[in-house]
Structure formats: C-alpha cells, structure tokens
Image (spheres, rainbow, N blue to C red):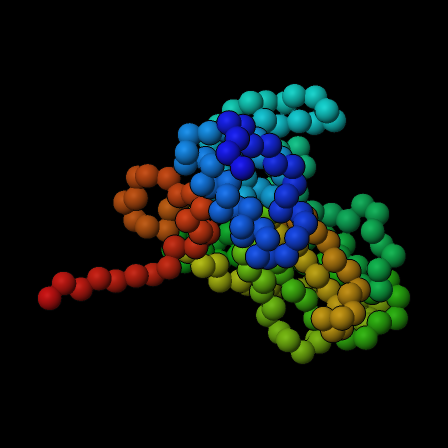
Amino acid sequence: MDPEILIIDEVLAVGDAEFQKKCLGKMEDVSKSGRTILFVSHNLAAIENLCSKGILLDQGKLKCIDPIEKVIDAYQSLFGGSQSNQWENTGNTEFPLVILKAGLNVKGAQPQHMLSLQLDLKSGAAHKDAFLAIDISNSAGITIGQAIPILDPFIKDTPSTKTVEVEVDLPPLIPDLYKVSIWLGSHNTETFCWEKEILGFEIVDSPTAGRNFPHTHNHGFVVPNSRVQIN
C-alpha cells in the first residue's frame, strides 16, 4: 500500500500479537512519510502513541476536535470511572460479600506516596473465607498494578459489618488521574464481588524533583529510581 490517506478501523481488535505488531509498524511508517492516518479505535494507549490530533464522537455526534491529550481527557470524562475518594453502594447488594462503603486518602509526597483505603464489608450470603485485591489503573484505562495485602483468605463470614483498612505503597507514578477497583473472593477463580473503578485519585507532582517538562504515557507510567556515576 502507498496511500495518501490510510483509514484503519479497530484493526487492533482482531488478529494475534504478531499481526497487531505489523499493523502498528505499518502505521508508524506511513505517518513518518508525511501521509495522513485516520485511526479508529478504543485502544487509548495506541491512540496516544500514534496520533497527534483526535476526533471524539458520542452517539454519532461530534464532541470535539483537539490535540490528542485533550480528546482522551474528554473521552475519560464521558466514560471513565469515578474520581471521588468516597464511594457508597447504592444497589449491588446481592453478592455473597458486599462492599457497603469505600474511601481512600493519598498520604506522603513524591516519590513515596501511600494509598490508604477503608472498606466497610458485609456478608450478604454464606461464603468461604475471602481475601481482597486492589487494581490501580491510569486515565487511559490501563491497569498499572495490583496489590494483594494478604494472599490467604482472612475475611470471615459473619453477620456484622466488617471494616478493613489497607495501605498500599505506590511506586513513583507520573502525574495523572488514577482509578481504583476492588475485588473480593475466596480464590482467583471464585469471585464474590468486583467493584470496578469506584474510587479515584490524582497525582500532581513529578516523581523527579525539579523536572519542568511533562510526562507522557508513551514513556511509561512509573519513573524508576536511577543513579549515574562518572569515572
């Protein structure tokens, strides 16, 4: 192919990893040649890496045409999860183990933030002992990590409400909006409750002291500690 305009619709939703890799490579080659690519996708990471400008459609209507970062932000505001640090269950009470309330606070400062969560749980039906997992995703919807404080099931089946407090040491995350999902179950193959993206928090400062140019997702989501020595 040698097109002036290359139109690609959800090509990353099909094919194996090798096929997708070839597609991404072809799109990068075409874009570097100065030609235009119209890339239609829900894969935000690929969109951010490939595109400089975006068009957001909602129910077939044009919402905005802007630089890609602004379009992704607009998309997240329409369809993203909660950015609140408090959540209360308003209907999902039929699970064997139910989250009634959840709250979080971000403590500390870069590069040593800590996530503090408090969960009010109640057994809705007889269940095995359970444990919990906490998924953290970024504004592009990519899960960047999962915390499991205790691998052995420790949440008992009792009639009273239980309060569980969890502390998660965060890595040096880049500035972004992050979402928290909470899973409860007795085994990785047995889920009692999974509340997705019910809490959110924002990291404002760079993990690198004195950095005055922005971080971008195409260079990763964590800034590893590093050192240099000149002999």
Up the image or down, 21 lies above or below 184; here it is above
Identify the image quadrant of residue 193.
Answer: bottom right
Which residue is more in the foreground, 5 or 68? 5
Residue drawn at x 14%, y 63% is: 230
Expressed as whole percent of the image width and height from the top left, the position of residue 71 reads 55, 30
Expressed as whole percent of the image width and height from the top left, the position of residue 228 reads 22, 62
Q: Is residue 14 left or right of residue 189?
A: left
Which residue is more in the foreground, 98 or 180? 180
Expressed as whole percent of the image width and height from the top left, the position of residue 223 reads 39, 55
Which residue is more in the foreground, 32 or 108? 32
Q: Is residue 193 left or right of residue 35?
A: right
Residue drawn at x 42%, y 30% is: 34
Q: Is residue 157 left or right of residue 60?
A: right
Which residue is more in the foreground, 151 or 105? 151
Up the image or down, 197 lies above or below 150; here it is above
Expressed as whole percent of the image width and height from the top left, the position of residue 13 reads 67, 47
Residue 48 shows up from this direction: no
Q: Seen from this angle, which residue lies furthest front? A: 1
Identify the image quadrant of residue 84.
Answer: top right
Q: How many numbered discs sit on the rendered protein?
A: 0
Residue 5 shows up from this direction: yes
Residue drawn at x 57%, y 57% is: 18
Residue drawn at x 63%, y 39% is: 41
Q: Seen from this angle, which residue lies furthest left? A: 231
Q: Quadrant of the C terminus?
A: bottom left
Q: Quadrant of the N terminus?
A: top right
